Amino acid sequence: MNNKIRVEELKDQGISKIIYYETIESTNKIAKERAKKGAPDGTIIIAEEQTAGKGRLGREWYSPKGRGLWFSLVVRPNILPTEVHYLTIISSLAILKAIRGLGLEADIKWPNDIIIKGKKVCGILSELDSKNEMVNFAIIGIGINVNQEYFPQHLNKKATSLKIELGKEIDRILLLKDIIVNINKYKQLLLKKETDYLLSLWKERLTVIGEEVIVYDGKASIKGRVIDVASRGELVLKDNSGEVHTFWAGDVSLRKENYI
Ligand code: BT5
C-alpha cells in the first residue's frame, strides 16, 4: 500500500495553513522561506518524499516516497530564544505519546530521537529565527519512519519503522492528526510556562541518564557517564577522570558503543 497523505483531513486540527508537496528538497527549507514571508503560526509543510532531507550538523535524513511522515511546522510562540529547546521537548513528548498509543514501547534518546528497542524511528530538527531577543519564528521539522519495510544498508542497523515494529501498515494521516493534537496540548503548557513540568516528563522518558556514552563535538570525542540533563536540556557528563562537562543539544552527537 502506498496511499497519499489525505491532507484535507488536517483542517480544523489547529493547523492554519497546509502546504503539500509530492517531492521537495526539504520541508524545513521551505518552511523557513515561507515563515520569512509571513506564513502564520500553525502552518504545516508536508511532503511524500524529500530529496535533501536535513538532520542536525549538516547530516542527511533519508525520506523515501510515501512511506514516512516528513513535515515541518511553523510556530511563532511567545518564548525566549533560550527556551527554544522546549519545542523539541514538546514534539518528542507528543510523538512518543502517539507511538505508545499504537502499543509500541518507544523512548527518547537525547536530544532529539525517538527510538524503539535502540533503533531510531524518528528525528526532530528545530530551527530558530529570533528578533529583538524574542523568537520571531521557529521551525519544528519532524521525520517519522512509518511504513518502510527495509532501509538502505548504511541505516539498516540503526533505523526502524513503525510497520517493522508493529507488523502492520499504519494510516499516516491518523498518526499525524494524533501528533498535532498532542503537540498543541503540550504547547499550551509551554505557553503557560509549565517548563519544569515538561522537563520532568521528558526526563522520565530519556534513556540516556546513567549510561556510558561517547560525545563528539565535531572536533574531539569525550567518553563518560551521563549524570544528568540540566534545565536547558544540556547533557551533563562525567568523564573517566571525574571532570564534569556540559553539552548543548545542537552541538554534539552522542553514541553508545555498539549502538546507533
Ligand atoms: C535528526 O538529525 O534526527 C533530525 C531529522 C529531521 C528530519 C525532518 S524530516 C522533515 C524535516 N525536513 C527536513 O529536511 N528535516 C526535517 P540527526 O540527529 O542529525 O540524525 C541524522 C542521522 O540519522 C543521520 O546521520 C543518519 O545516521 C540517521 N538517519 C538518516 N535518515 C534516517 C531515517 N530515515 N531513519 C533513521 N535514522 C536516519
Image (cartoon, grey):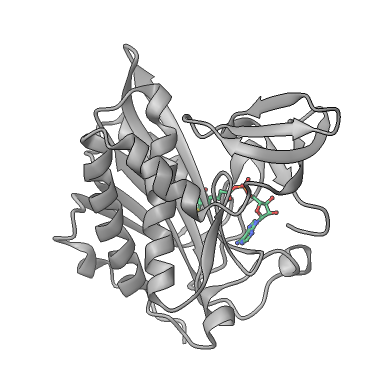
Up/down of 198 relative to 153, above or below: above
Find the residue positioned furthest to the top: 132
**Most foreground residue, 193 or 240:** 240
Q: Left or right: where does residue 214 sit relative to residue 197?
A: right
Q: Residue at 37% of width from left, 21% of height from top?
A: 130
Where's residue 157, x and y in %?
75, 68
Where's residue 51, x and y in %?
57, 56
Q: Left or right: where does residue 131 sit relative to residue 220?
A: left
Q: Residue at 44% of width from left, 35% of height from top?
A: 85
Count of numbered marks: 0
Where's residue 191, x and y in %?
23, 35
**Most foreground residue, 150 or 222:** 222
Where's residue 258, x and y in %?
83, 59
**Most foreground residue, 237 or 109:** 237
Q: Residue at 76% of width from left, 45% of height from top?
A: 213
**Most foreground residue, 143 or 196:** 196
